[in-house]
Structure formats: C-alpha cells, structure tokens
Image: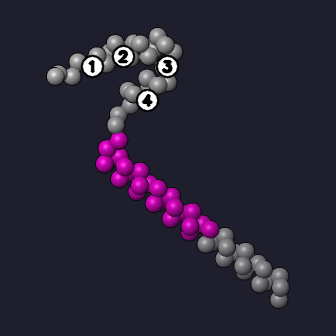
Amino acid sequence: MANNFNMVAFMDALVEGGFSARFQLIDSPLLTRDYLDMRLTQWKSEMIQWMVGLVVVQSGVTAVLFKLLH
C-alpha cells in the first residue's frame, strides 16, 4: 500500500481550523543527531560558565566573611 498522505490538504485543514501554531510545529525540521550534538555542546559550555562563575562568587563571599570575622 502506497503512502497517499496529502500534506498540503492536511496543512490547509489545520489552517482553516485555526491551528496555525500547530502548523509551524509540523513544518519545522526534525531533530537530527548533529543538532542534538550542537545543543549538548552549547549546554555543556553554559554549565561550565555558570560553575566557574559560582566558584568565583563563592570564593569572594568566603574571603569577605573571613575578613569580617577576623
């Protein structure tokens, strides 16, 4: 059995029914391994930046507390 799905008719029916936001989701490209690898790399970079920033802030707060308590 051949795949007889008519994407144009389906999208027209969605738009007529007021589902334009849903149409954008359907029309968007599928996730690929390259895209996921790129997003994971970005996420790792952001996490490293946050962790380094938190260590710097924590060190500063600790130094101020030692200075105030002595």
Residue visible at 23% across and 18% down in the picture: 4
Mark toward the start of the polypeptide (3 vs 2): 2
What amino acid type should be assigned to the residue bearing mark 4?
Leu
The residue that disc 2 covers is: 10
Is 5 placed above or below 60 here? Answer: above
Image quadrant where residue 55 sits: bottom right
Q: Which residue is denoted by mark 3 in the rendering?
A: 19
What amino acid is at disc 1? Phe
Percent across and percent down for residue 25 are 43, 29
Label 2 – label 1 distance at C-alpha: 8 Å
Question: Are there few (<14), some (14-19), or many (20+) residues within 10 Å of tag 3?
Answer: few
Judged by depth in the image, the label closer to the viewer, 1 or 4, is 1
Mark 4 or mark 2: whose residue is earlier in sequence: 2
Task: Describe the element under mark 3 as helix, strand or loop.
Answer: loop
Q: Which mark is residue 35?
A: none
Mark 3 touches mark 1? (CB < 8 Å): no
- Numbered circles on residues, count: 4
Q: Residue 41: x percent and y percent?
A: 40, 57
Label at residue 5: 1
- Residue 61 % position (x, y): 73, 74
- CB-based contact (under 8 Å), mark 4 and mark 2: no
Query: Are dots 2 and 1 in contact, CB under 8 Å?
Result: yes
Amino acid at dot 2 = Phe
Q: Cβ–Cβ below 8 Å for labels 4 and 3?
A: no
Q: Earlier in the sequence, mark 4 or mark 3?
A: 3
The numbered disc on residue 25 is 4
Q: CA distance from mark 4 to mark 2?
A: 13 Å
- Measured as percent of width and height from the top left, residue 30 is found at 34, 37
* Mark closer to the chain start, 3 or 1: 1
Please tell me whether residue 55 is drawn above or below residue 15 in the rendered image. Answer: below
What residue is at 76 percent from the left and 78 percent from the top? 64
Badge 4 crowding class, 10 Å Cα cut-off, few under 14, some 14 to 19, many 20 or more, is: few
